[in-house]
Image: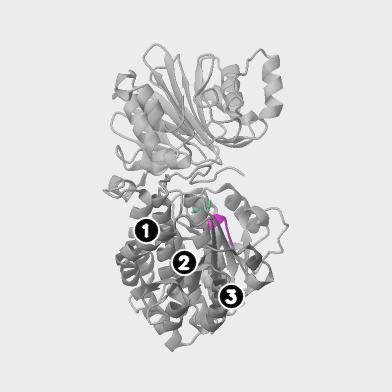
Amino acid sequence: MCGIVGYVGERNAAPILMKGLEKLEYRGYDSAGIAVHDGKNVNIYKAKGRLKVLEERYPPSEVAGVLGIGHTRWATHGEPSELNSHPHVSGRIAVVHNGIIENYQRLKPWLEEKGFNFISETDTEVAAHLVNHFYEGNLLRALKKAVALLEGSFALGVLSADYPDTLVAVRKASPLIVGIGDNENFIASDIPAILEHTRKVYLLDDGDMVVLKKNDVRLYNSLGERIRKEIFHVTWDADMAEKGGWAHFMVKEINETPKVLHDTLLPRIDENGRFSLSEISGFAAMAGGLRRLFIIGCGTAYNAAMMGKYFIERTARIPVEVDYASEFRYRKPLIGRGDACIVISQSGETADTLAAMREAKKRGARVVAITNVVGSSVAREADEVFYTWAGPEIAVASTKAYSAQLMALFIIGTELAFRVGGIDEEQYSAMLSALIKIPEQVQRVLDNVARIQQVAAERFNAKNVFYIGRGMDCPLSMESALKLKEICYTHAEAFAAGELKHGPLALLERGTLVVSLMTEEALIDKTISNMIECRTRSAYILGIAMEGNIKAVETSDECIMIPRTMDCFAPMLAAVAAQLFAYYVAVQKGLDVDKPRNLAKSVTVE
Ligand code: AGP
């Protein structure tokens, strides 16, 4: 996790570094720091807490120098403190690091024997000392030797006091891009950090190193050989990574859902009005003979995977196994040739998901990635990629990317179902037509925000919240509860409605808020019985149901209505209502919606 940024050029580095870090704060925000070369020395500025503490303490306009590196931290080794924050210094070397150096405990005594003194509790300090140990005036050579000894995941940005015009960096299993400007160049953990300055980037591969000067970018592989790369042109603009007048990124991103769904869906409909799976043609060709499908992800992506299972098993009748990536990678999964594996990741950089994907590939399965980030590690390592065109998602809590993941799964699942004879031509057309209407129907959910806001204002104090549902409302409950946990710090649990009486009902007390998701209308009577069981025990019931569902309205204390669509696609509408509810509860509680405590957006460590 953590975000790093680097600049070399003609302008003052500090404001550019701080601005870049602002865009990376979603990756970690417990401390921040920069190192700036003033022409003679490398000066270090650090502060515990949010980036604004650093900016207030060291106004960027007062920091001189045209070369620098910066870091925003999500603590892994050592508590959040000024001492543990980056950059870390060893002699004339300064280093920023994103990732985890797994063998730091082995390297530390070896370096101590050589006379290096450790002052922090971080793994990163090992990297700084190691580069210093090998440094004999050639920064790239020292970095290469240090990297050869480091195990784990890391993106490093390195400066030497001896070179007021040079920045070196390396990427291994942690994201790093190079931005190419006019008389200036950049490194960053993610594109938004540099988008204000350039849209031309190099996407580094594992082991790649780079030497940057203001007029020169040299790329090297892990052997130290010069390499060339295609320039990647970023198509989205800086506005998409800005709040644009909204109070928080989260609410902005929820409101982008209609566009995101439209962008994810329309390019996949061909001139004959049918779904095209041309991007994943190898996977599509397996449809008839597919033994089993695995879908893997973490957090929200896992919840989307679970929704995919319900949908694909129901329509295509292909067995689907869903796994947490963190479990899949170690449980010796029974996956092999003839199986396919869909890996879902918004960022495309989640460490567990990447490892699980490699495991699936190693065992012979065909791997398809559903990801939002072009050129991400997941995208590059998968056999085929089906992009969600959601644009940058900055808020830690995933919203629009989740919706796009569902849309991707529904497109793939519908086409798969038709190819294997699970649905006929008429059902296929009806499903396609229903999906086309979804973006406009999501807009109607968004237009109903005042109602959702009102319920949130009335109920934000609930200490315990149950989310219940049957069928596809069950994975939807999981995702809805996760949103509340993440940004409201409210204890929220998802239960299959039928499971309540097998234990969880014991937790129910006066004032417990039960959010009942009722888009599975074929099962509505069963869910209603469960709601009544809760009501008779003094719970407050908030329903979410499709328009015209009288029973849902009658049984709920309050019911948020969503437009009518096919049951199987209604979760895309109900999810947006649940996201808005969580958002307004967090706002009522006065919490930091976009950067919830203890979390970070991209979980690039295990
Ligand atoms: C979502 O709200 C969470 N922040 C988190 O669960 C996230 O979905 C998970 O870490 C997976 O991230 P990814 O999609 O980038 O792989």
Can see residue 343?
no
Q: Are marks 1 and 3 in contact (CB under 8 Å)?
A: no
Q: The residue under label 1 is which amino acid type? A: Ile
Most extreme residue toward the left, as rendered? Answer: 245
Q: Is residue 299 magenta?
A: yes
**Residue 533 shows which numbered tag?**
3
Q: Earlier in the sequence, mark 1 or mark 2?
A: 1
Of label 3 and label 2, which has the lower sequence position? 2
Mark nearest the camera among 1 and 2 is 1
Q: Say which of 77 and 230 sits in front.
A: 77
Q: What separation in Å lies between label 1 and label 3 (alpha carbons)?
A: 33 Å
Say left or right for 552 vs 108. left
The residue where tag 2 is placed is 406
Quick one: SS at disc 1? helix
Label 1: which residue?
Answer: 254
Q: Which residues are magenta?
A: 296-300
Q: CA distance from mark 1 to mark 2?
A: 14 Å
Whether disc 3's CB lies below 8 Å from ligand 1 is answered no
- At 50% from the left and 51% from the top, the residue drawn is 486
Q: Residue at x 33, y 30 (%)?
A: 16
Nearer to us in this view, 124 or 76: 76
- Report crowding for label 2: few under 14, some 14 to 19, many 20 or more residues within 10 A (C-alpha): many
Q: Secondary structure at mark 2?
A: helix
**Amino acid at dot 2:** Leu
**Label 1 environment density (alpha carbons within 10 Å; few <14, some 14–19, many ≥20):** many
Quote the CA–CA distance across marks 3 and 2: 31 Å
The x, y position of residue 458, in whole percent, is 40, 60
Left or right: 122 in relation to 330: left
Where in the figure is residue 536, as x and y percent of width and height?
56, 74
